[in-house]
Amino acid sequence: MIDFVLATRFSEHFHSLNLRQHPDHYSFLGRLGSGVVSRVQEYGAGVYFNPYISVNGTMIKYAVVNLDTMRRDLTDWDTLYLAGRLHKPVKILFEEPNIRVANQRNLISAVRCALLLLPQTFTEKELYSTITGLSYQGDPRMTYGSENPKKVYNIVTHQIKNFRLLYHDLIMSLPNISYADEKPLDTPSWMEDPKLDLRLSQDMDIERRANMVRRLPKSFREKVYFRYQRKFGIPGRQYQEMLEASKDEDAKGGLKKQVGSAFDKRIVAEKDLPEQISKAIQQTVNWPSSVQSVKGILTAGPVRSWRYLQEKREKARMKS
């Protein structure tokens, strides 16, 4: 089944037109009208799925989402539901300019977040596996066995060339990460070689790592900050002042240079930083993913939802 994501400016209008043309794509909710469908869409991650749709003999599943919801998740990591899907190689059929810019921010945020979870030296596959696994942390489907436990490994192993195409230029643009052995990079066909697993290293300087924390997506960064506010016992008023100082916008509405503060430096000096970031990821992912899973019973209908769950579990058993 091929997955599609359709981002629209006005979801209710889209559903209204789609219900007239393809009423069979919808569960019983479709009979209640586009207003109800669009309101249900807003729960959880703001995505509405229609699975098991046959188009010219090909089975597809398509998601409908508002452009603003998508852009916000890509830039702020509100839920990581859509941002996480775009951390992996995908085929983009049409890209709205603002979404293109937002997704570039999303991809570089994924690299920074992965670096904060990784040691000083690591391999390409470890980097791409860490990036791919971000949005699966806290996903109830991974916890309750309805998803293949080797999914991250399979995605990275089978698409290593596409991961390189997606992330290599971003890696080269960052000042704190480099390839340990650059010789293979001189070979024109190195990206095509699935056996290569190049080693990389990152600068563990506190100032550079503090800058990475400061440049994490806004909603996600605030979750990391809140975890350390509790750990350090920082009073509420002082914490609010710190959040205000860490805003990206200046008083005139422009953008401030994102430089790590004393608080960011204190955070990266802590040995439990990877653990706290992982917990912030789980906190970000768990609730919207859980709501989307429950919502699927309504949007897909009980029969198609049960079929989807059974197929997922069967696939997980066969590949585990």
Image (spheres, rainbow, N blue to C red):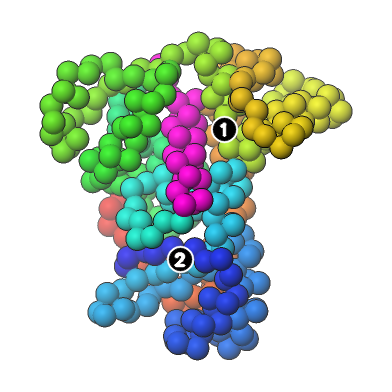
Q: Give, as a single range, the part of the protein colored magenta.
A: 97-120
Residues 99 and 305: in front is 99
Which residue was labeled with disc 2? 6
How much space separates mark 2 and mark 1, taking CA atoms? 26 Å
Which residue was labeled with disc 1? 216
- Residue 131, compared with residue 302, is above or below; it is above
Q: Quadrant of residue 316?
A: bottom left
Q: Where is residue 26 in the image (x, y as percent from the top left)?
A: 49, 81
What is the secondary structure assignment of the residue under circle 2? strand
- Residue 262, compared with residue 320, is above or below; it is above
Horizontal arrangement in the rendering, residue 105 relative to residue 165 (left or right): right
Residues 29 and 34: in front is 34
Q: What residue type is labelled 1?
A: Leu
Q: Count all numbered tags in the image, as a single digit.
A: 2
Picture quarter with the N terminus? bottom left
Q: Which amino acid does label 2 sit on?
A: Leu
Q: Position of residue 138 (x, y in %)?
A: 54, 46
Is residue 215 at all visible to an observer of this figure? yes
